[in-house]
Structures are given as structure tokens and as C-alpha cells.
Amino acid sequence: MSTALPDRFDAVIVGGGPRGVAAVLRTAARVATSGAGPARLAVVDAMAVGPGATWMIDQPAQYLNNTQADATTVHPDDSTRMSGPAAPGPDLVDWARRVRAEGGHPAGEWVLTEASELTGATFPTRRLQGVYFRDQLDAAIATGAVEVTEVVGLAVDLEQLGEETVVVLRDGRRLAAPTVVLAQGMVQSQRSHDVTALVDFADRFALRYVEPGMPAERTYTGLPAGEPVLVRGLGANFFDVIGQLAAEWGGEFTLVDGDARGRLRYHPSGLEPQLVVGSRRGVPYRSKPDGGRSVRPFVPRWASAEWFDALTTRSDVDFRSEVWPVLAREFARVYLDALTEVAPDAVAGEWLPGLDVADTQDEVDAVLSGAVPDPRWAWTLDELHRPTHGEPIGEKGWSQLVRRLIADELGSMSDPWRHPRAAVNGAMGALRRSIGRLTRHGVFTGESLARDVLGWFDGDSLALASGPPAERVRLVLALIEAGVVELIGPELVIEADETAGLFRAASPITGRVVTSSVLLETRMSKGKIPQTSDPLLRALLDSGRARVHAVDGVQTHSMEATRAEICEDAHGGHNLVAADGTVDESVVVLGIPAASTQPGSAIGATPGVASPLLAGADVAAKQILVRARVGSVAQAT
């Protein structure tokens, strides 16, 4: 333990992204209402205070948010239940309007350019959103209600010093306070055995390997023209990377004449490699609709609010056998409803009675198979996990499936009110919020939570309902049709070919095998706390001062923190739980590191929508002021 005297504050917030910023804003709102002196806060981030790692201001302009601008704020409104005072502030669209009115921004001329082009339906760049977060932090500081010391450094441990907790940084600095808020956001995982082996293989054979991680912290550009390059990962990062690469290549995208769906054609520059891309599912995340287009509303038939309410009274629910079949019915129903409207000849017979009595996914899939004999529109729930039902189909069959994927994506983006796959995406977006509510209530058994909800449903819901912007998907589809991007197939296997000294990618479903000297991982190394690489969280877990949250003895992916009661008289909440079950009331854990006890906190705040992220920030702010050492602040609540 270091003997150096620490710098002292009323609170230390570890994490300078939106959760940390929100905690500062809520603290400032409470201090301003009370009329007490300023709260002295230290905000620590390894990358940058304000934007944090995800929203770095100096990252490539091609990296986009996957949420529309009008769905982004860091200020709570009446939709978010909290006990602290209201403190209205601009959402992202309001802020951009102010930037336009002022005619410039200190961060650079590009901020005015992007703000001038922003509408509510725009998918903003991540860097622009980072400037918004930074400006909101600066506005809170300007009120005088908080004094913020910004610390760029890596927190590695916590120590106890009397009644205070000390945050220890890697460079030896020590920051002490009565309250520490852990708001790291998207934490990364330690290298897996697979990744470690690939790093070693690349070093031995002088190959290029980009391992999983945050895209702003990796380099993907400078690929060899005309040569195969292997890519693993078809989620959100993939689309950002492709946008950056396409800008580097300098080819031209043009609208296809007469195509009402907005199809693009790519005209190569000659600098392009051949990107051979795969993943477990083998197909990319599904697109968001074109910004501003009306989306088919989802009205449940079986998964009603009353049905979900009844489940919240239980703690023994098995997701796979009790909940998923009901959701599957809804997905099948909305697909068939929409298909009946857009292509009535493709639907055969009466299918609703069959769904009414379907008790398993297999029974739902049987109804879908019987109702849609037309191969162009045939679809089953099993395809969410396995696009070919796990059956080998060869390169020709896969090529046909990819052509259908392109057609479905173009239709879904351009006509989200009518297209059947858009209807499924929309239903998933609505129902996943209700599943989060069930998780918050602790209704699932530990086995089902780990095996089903965390094991596969969360991933499927992200793939359908949290996909990339339409403009980026159109770009990728054009590159596929131009032959620059090839989807190799599902169940991707990456191996180190020691004989050839090359990376080897293969899909047992398509039979396609490709070797290359370059492998890019466009998947994130994120979020599972038992394998986290965050040194502070690792130290807490390894020492027993924190533990992984478990349900019925089955571990989740998150740290355990206490629940929070939204009441001004409750002076705890979201506090760290040690391996022996004791609660450290001086440490507040916000959001992603404790996501299993705070469902929904990983999602950014949206105006008019209840936000667990902002509600948690208010819980943290209340504790900061209750435990503040300065008497005038301590009486603020």
C-alpha cells in the first residue's frame, strides 16, 4: 500500500463517459437545488473525460451511432422515475441546433458541419455525440455547483483509508473520497486462449492480426489491394470498419437507376482487397429503417402487458419453455400479417389457429413452414440462430441465401411499415424491453437466465433490433454485390495454418475455405465481468471485495450490486457486494459492470423514455451528497 497522501474529494467517479457525466449532472442539480457549496468531484478516465472511450472526439468520422439523434440525451425528464430534482437540459438535437445558431464550436469546424446536417432522423457520428457529452459536462461545471478535477489515467485498485475509499491509479496517484462511483461503461475482456494463440502465431510468421476491441483503439486501414483479407465479426463494429475502409479506398457509390429501395452500386478504385467475412451466425446484424420512415407498430396478441405482469410475481420462470414460445408466436404472427399484405399469394391457408395452440418453437416453425410455401418468403424462427437450419448447403445455396438477404434488407430499410422482416425487427425491439423488465424483477431461474436470456436471447435481440444505420448497410450490400466483401458462411472457424504460415477461415455450412496473411477481428471484446481485463474490477474480484452476481447459484456476466429504492430517504443503492455478501456502501456501481442487477442500464438515455442509466446516476448523486465531507454539502439532501 502506498504511503503517499491522497488528494481528497467529495466523490471520485471512475469512468468519464455518459454514465460518469450523468452522475456529475445529477450531483450538480442536487447541489443547485439545495443552495449548498460546490461538491468537489474527481472524474477519472483512461482515455478522455466527457466522451469516454466509445465517444472519443478524435475517432474516425465514419464511426456512427446506431441510434437516431432524436433518441439521445443525458438529461432526465418526467419519464424517468427518480427522487432528485428536475434539471432540464438539451438533448442531442437541441444541442446541435444551438451549435448552428452560434455558428461554430471550439472543438473544430467539423462540429458545425455535422451539427448543421443533423436532423432527428440522422444517425450521428460517435465523435459528434462525444462533443455533446463533453459540452454537457462543461455546462454543469459552469454552474458552480460542482468543481470537477479531470484525471486521465487508469484506475487499478481501491484502498480503505479510515472512513474514505482511495482510488489508486497505475501511475501511483491516489484519490480519496467518502464515495466512489464505478461508471466504466463498456468494459473489455481479457485475451481468450484463442486470441492469445493467434497473436503468437501472427508474431511468429510476421502476419497482421487485429484482435477484438473498441474500433477507435484499433487500426484496420492499409490493407493489401487485390488480396484476400479475413474478417471475423458481423455486428455493429463491422459496419463502422467497413465505412472507414471504403473512405480510404476512394471508390464511388452511385444510386442504381430505377431502384426505389435505394440500392447502391460500387465502382472500385483498384485499392480494394477482397474481404472474406464470417461469424457464428454468418449474416450481418439487421439494419435500422431509413431515418424518418414510419415503422409498423407492434400490438401484442399473446405477450400482453397483463401476461408480463403475471410473470413478474414469480421467480421460477424458464425462459426457453415458458417465454420464448410466446415471443416466437408474436414474431411469426407479425411476419405473416405483413406478408399477407405485401405478397398475399405467398401465404397459404389459415395460420392463426395454429399459432394460437403452438406451445414450442418447433410448433411455431411448423406453422410458418406450412403457411409460406413460396421459397422466396419462407422463414422460420430457427433462422435467427442458424440461417440454414444448421444444414450444409454449399456455395451455390449460400449465394442464393445472400441474394435473398440483400433483397430483404433493402425492402426492410425502405419500407419498414410493410416489409415482413421489418415487422419482426420491430416486434423484437418492443419485446426485448419487456424481457429486461422481467430480468429486473428476478423472475428467471439462474439456469435459464444464464443459458437463455444471457446465453442467446440478448445476442439475437441485438442482431435484430439494435443494428446499424440504413446508409451503412446499403454501403455493405453494394460491396457484397461488387465482390469486394464476401460472406463466407455460418459457423466460421478461424485456424492457424502452421504449414502454410497463414490464417485459415472455413465455414462447414458452405464448404468455403480461404487463407490470408491478414485477419481483422471486428467483434468487440466486451462486457463479461468474470473475464474482464479492467484492472480495477479485476483487483476487486480477485481480492474478494466484489463478486460475480449469481441467481440460484448460477453466475451471470456481471458484478453484484444492491438494488436501488427510488426514495429520498433511502441512502443506499447500486452498492458493491463482496464475496462474503457484505455491502460496501461507499462504492456505487453504475450500469454495464452490474448490468444483471440493473437491466437496461447499458442502453443510452432517450427523451421521453424511462432511463435506468439516468435513474442510477441520480441514486449515485444522492449518496455522494449524503456522505460528502463538507458540512454544507452533507446537508444538501
Image (cartoon, rainbow, N blue to C red):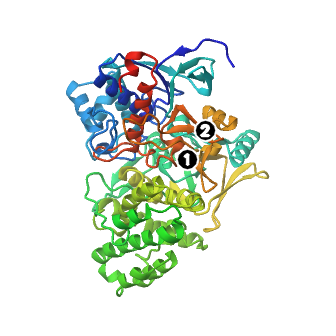
Q: Is residue 42 left or right of residue 494?
A: left
Above-or-below relation of 101 to 207: above
Choose between 32 and 497: the one closer to the eye.
Answer: 32
**Which residue is identified by label 1?**
522
What quarter of the picture does the N terminus occupy? top right
Q: Label 2 near label 1: C-beta < 8 Å?
A: no
Tell me residue 158's x, y (percent). Answer: 61, 27
Q: Position of residue 323 (x, y in %)?
A: 47, 68
Return the residue nearer the eye: 606 or 86.
Answer: 86
> Label 1: how many residues lie within 10 Å, few (<14), some (14-19) or many (20+)?
many
Is residue 60 depicted above or below 498 in this figure?
above
Can I make out residue 285 in this image?
A: no
* Secondary structure type for disc 1: loop
Along the viewing direction, whichever of 203 and 378 lies nearer the viewer: 378
When asked about the image quadrant of residue 455, the answer is bottom right
Disc 2 target residue: 582
Residue 552 seen in render: yes
